[in-house]
Image: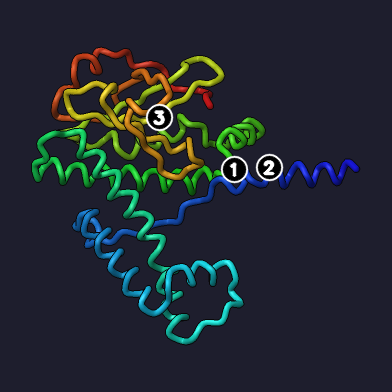
Amino acid sequence: MRIKCAFIFFFLFLFPLVSFAYILPEIHLSQTDLQLSADHHYSDLLKQKSSLSNSLSFSKYEEYKKNPKLRLNKQERIAAAGFAKLLPNLEFWTYVFRLKQDILNLHEIKTNNIKNEADLLARETILSLYKSSREFKIKSWPLLHNTFIKLSKNARGYCYHYVENLKRDLGSQNWNFFTLAWVEAYSGKYREHNTLAIAKKGETIENSIIVDGWRNGSKPFWIRREDDHYPWKLYQVINNSAHKAPSSLSAAPQKAPKTEAP
C-alpha cells in the first residue's frame, strides 16, 4: 500500500514538477554570428523553418519526435534532421529578439546606437541565462530545486546565483544607454527573491524590465516591473558605465554579498 501511494505521489506531484524545466542547450556563436543583429538571425531562421516545412510539416515533425517509429520518406528524414539542428538556434534567437524589442521600448527615441546596445545587451543576457541553466542543471520546479540545494553544500541555483552570474557576464561592460540593477523583494524573509532589472539610463527600477532566470526553472523570463507582483526594491547597481547612474540608484548602499535566498 505504501509503495502504491508513493507511486501515486510521484506521478501526481513530483513528476509534473520535474518536467517543469529543462536544461537549455549550449549555443555556439561564430564571429559572423556576433556581427549580425538578432533581427537578422530571427528572420533568417524563420525563413529556414518555412523552407523545411515544404518537405515536412512542423506538426508532423513534432509527431515524429514523440514517435520515432513514424515512417518518413528520404526527403522528410532530411528535413527532420534540419529541424533538429535549426530549432535550438531559433529558440535562442527568438528569446534574444523579443528581449531586445522590450528593452528598446524603454526608450522613446531609438537611435542606431541604442538599437545596437539593446541588441548586445539582450544577446549577452540570454547567453548568461543559458550558461546558468547548464551550470545549475535545474530539472524541477524552482522551489523544489531549492530543497535539493540545501541537501548539498556545493550546489548552486538559488535566485541570487542567477543574478551573480548576470552581474559577472554583464557588469564589466560599459552600457551607455541602460542601467542594470540587482533588485530584491521580501528581503530577509522566507519569500525573499532576487533578480536583475534593466532600466533606461536616467530612470529608476520603477520603469524597468525584470529579468528572472530562476522563476521558470532556467527558461528565460522577463516582465515589465509594473506588471509584476513582486514588490521589487533596489539592492545595488551592477553595471560599469562611463555615465553616472541616476541619483536615486547611485545613492543606494552596496550591501554585503547574499549568502542564502530562495
Image coordinates of residue 220 in percent, x first then y, are 41, 43
SS of the residue at dot 1?
Answer: loop
In the image, is residue 218 above or below residue 257? below
Indicate the amino acid at tag 3.
Answer: Thr
Q: Is residue 153 visible?
A: no
Disc 3 residue crowd, few under 14, some 14–19, many 20+, Cα 10 Å: many
Spatial CA span between label 2 and label 3? 26 Å
Spatial CA span between label 2 and label 1? 8 Å
Disc 1 residue crowd, few under 14, some 14–19, many 20+, Cα 10 Å: many
Image coordinates of residue 13 in percent, x first then y, are 69, 41
Looking at the rendered structure, the number of numbered marks drawn on it comes to 3
Asked whether the beta carbons under mark 2 and mark 3 sit within 8 Å of each other, the answer is: no
Indicate the amino acid at tag 1.
Answer: Ser
- Identify the mark nearer the N-term, 3 or 1: 1
SS of the residue at dot 3?
Answer: strand
Disc number for residue 140: 1
Asked whether the beta carbons under mark 3 and mark 1 sit within 8 Å of each other, the answer is: no
